[in-house]
Amino acid sequence: QVQLVESGGGLVQAGGSLRLSCAASGRTFSMYVMGWFRQAPGKERAFVGAITWSGGTTFYADSVKGRFTISRDNAKNTVYLQMNTLNPEDTAVYYCAATTRRLWLPSLNEYHYWGQGTQVTVSS
């Protein structure tokens, strides 16, 4: 089992930045990919970006490319989502997820473990 805990959400003005953290515990050695997703009110959960746990390969949704950056600190078992130039459309609950399946790029349904989510609100 892997446990994931997100932190770092909050309220920020448009154009501002936030950094989310996702701390992993448990059988972290089994993780292959960690992803970030977000869910706005009334919308489905959407892919934001992902990173391979070992090699650090990343991939981003077009909507965040160039503004968001995913990184990881294996020593701390933590993945980060640096979000810059935020706009109100980025308002959502952000979730991190992990999968042990050796796939690139896994779909939403292929992630085994999910955090509880952290709210990000961007005011105009």
Image (cartoon, rainbow, N blue to C red):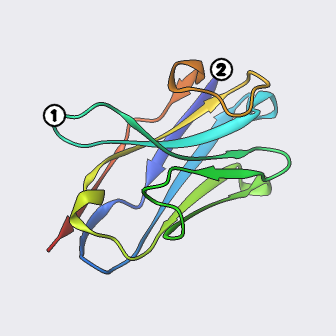
* Amino acid type of the residue tagged 2 in the rendering: Gln
Residue 1 quadrant: top right
Q: For the residues labelled 1 and 2, say whether their Cβ atoms are less than 8 Å apart.
A: no
- 77 relative position to 17: left or right: right
Which residue is pictured at 17% across the width and 40% down the height?
41
Which of the pair 1/42 is nearer the observer?
42
Sequence-wise, the earlier of marks 1 and 2 is 2
**Furthest residue toward right:** 55
Which of the pair 55/6 is nearer the observer?
55
Residue 69 at x, y percent in the picture? 58, 64
Residue 13 quadrant: bottom left
Which residue is pictured at 33% across the width and 80% down the height?
16
Q: Which label sits in the foreground, 1 or 2?
A: 1
* Residue holding disc 2: 1
Query: Circle 1: is it few (<14), some (14-19), or many (20+) Cα within 10 Å?
Result: few
Residue 124 at x, y percent in the picture? 14, 74
Residue 48 at x, y percent in the picture? 48, 48
Q: Which mark is residue 53?
A: none
Q: Is residue 78 above or below residue 123?
A: above
Which residue is pictured at 84% across the width and 45% down the height?
54
- 116 relative position to 109: left or right: left
Which residue is pictured at 77% across the width and 51% down the height?
57
Which of the pair 85/72 is nearer the observer?
85
* Residue holding disc 1: 42
* Amino acid type of the residue tagged 1 in the rendering: Gly
Q: Is residue 120 above or below residue 32?
A: below
> What kind of element bears circle 2?
loop
**Furthest residue toward bottom:** 15
Q: Is residue 113 above or below residue 58?
A: above
> What kind of element bears circle 1?
loop
Query: Circle 2: is it few (<14), some (14-19), or many (20+) Cα within 10 Å?
Result: few
